[in-house]
Amino acid sequence: MRVVLAGGGTAGHIEPALSLADALRRHDPTVQIVALGTARGLEVRLVPERGYELALIPPVPLPRRLSMDLLTVPIRLRKAIAAARAVIQGADVVVGFGGYVALPAYLAARRLKVPVVIHEANAKPGLANRVGARHAAAVAVASPAARLPRAIRVGMPLRQSVSGLHRELLRAEGRAFFGLPVDGPVLLVYGGSQGARSLNAAVDESLDTLLGSGVRVLHAVGAANELPPARPGYVPVPYLDRMDLAYAAADLAVCRAGAMTCAELAAVGLPAVYVPLPIGNGEQRRNAEPLVAAGGGALVPDGELDGDRLCAEVVPLLHDAERLRVMSRAASRFGVRDADERLAELVRSVVTH
């Protein structure tokens, strides 16, 4: 079987594609997998690191506003479709995850009569997947809120280090890894690889109160931001290379609400206070809302977050073990741990149909 993956640009597109690739290869080590990407995306680093072939095509970003750039879109799209077609020729299936490379891949696959399987990570589907879903052989979604024709909810394909995580068993190891005390509540604060200014500011304003209440804080500030000084009970890091151990060490998270973040926290059963990124089309809020409604977290608008609000949300909760257990169970029930296997089975069924 030869599979072409189309989902470059951001980690939110690339990571589920690579998790699917791993699942396909576990079942059939002979499967041929090539990922489409662009020279400007994270896939240039992430795909080869995982041992998969990467084929580059020209990016075709669609302007968000009316401008002269719109006039060049048809020309650039034709070039991208031609480049994608050369890679897709002879493939058994194209699996698309959205992003810049997905639309050219879907259009090229249709011309070649190669079946397409689409996976949508966000609660609000992007343009490429909305277009591709019209003629796809199968459509899978991570969120029950996503609206695409004939969609099947499979969840978000995750790294096995996360999907197979048992937080209680790794709790002591996680805390030792980050230099946190074995006992007492731990708050994990992170805003993605670049950090989040509002989260960092709220931690700075509330840190004395948090530590004074007995809360320990593991804080990923972002690789590009200045690292604050460590204090007893406060562990700042630029970036979390071991998210599995961070999840195991924590009792509660404060974070953004990207699709991958929501899926991972639900899968491992870690309650969270979600602070959606206040830009774009509101997709982060939509990502968090079903999980919050299920009882697995709380939601605070970015504009309302400050040190006082952070303390008001997390301090009572971190000192209420029973409420944390209830929220953890709710998150776990909402989460999907085997989405990679579910999506792999869907892909195989399309190929053998």
Image (spheres, rainbow, N blue to C red):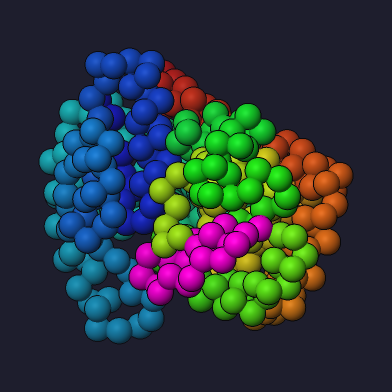
Q: Residue at x 73, y 50 (%)?
A: 184
Image coords of residue 254 (percent x, y): 63, 61
Task: Using the image as rendered, state which of residue 96 and residue 173 is in the foreground.
Answer: 173
Was residue 258 drawn as part of the magenta stretch in this picture? no
Was residue 230 drawn as part of the magenta stretch in this picture? yes
Task: Using the image as rendered, state which of residue 188 and residue 29 is in the foreground.
Answer: 188
70 versus 181 height, above or below: below
Q: Quadrant of the N terminus?
A: top left
Snapshot quadrant of residue 152 = top right
Q: Is residue 194 left or right of residue 266?
A: left
Image coords of residue 154 (percent x, y): 56, 34
Q: Residue at x 31, y 51 (%)?
A: 8
Image coords of residue 66 (percent x, y): 35, 83
Task: Using the image as rendered, state which of residue 154 and residue 109 is in the foreground.
Answer: 154
Snapshot quadrant of residue 34 = top left
Q: Which residues are magenta?
A: 216-236
**Which residue occupies the extreme front position in the image?**
232
Task: Using the image as rendered, state which of residue 313 and residue 86 is in the foreground.
Answer: 313
Residue 134 shows up from this direction: no
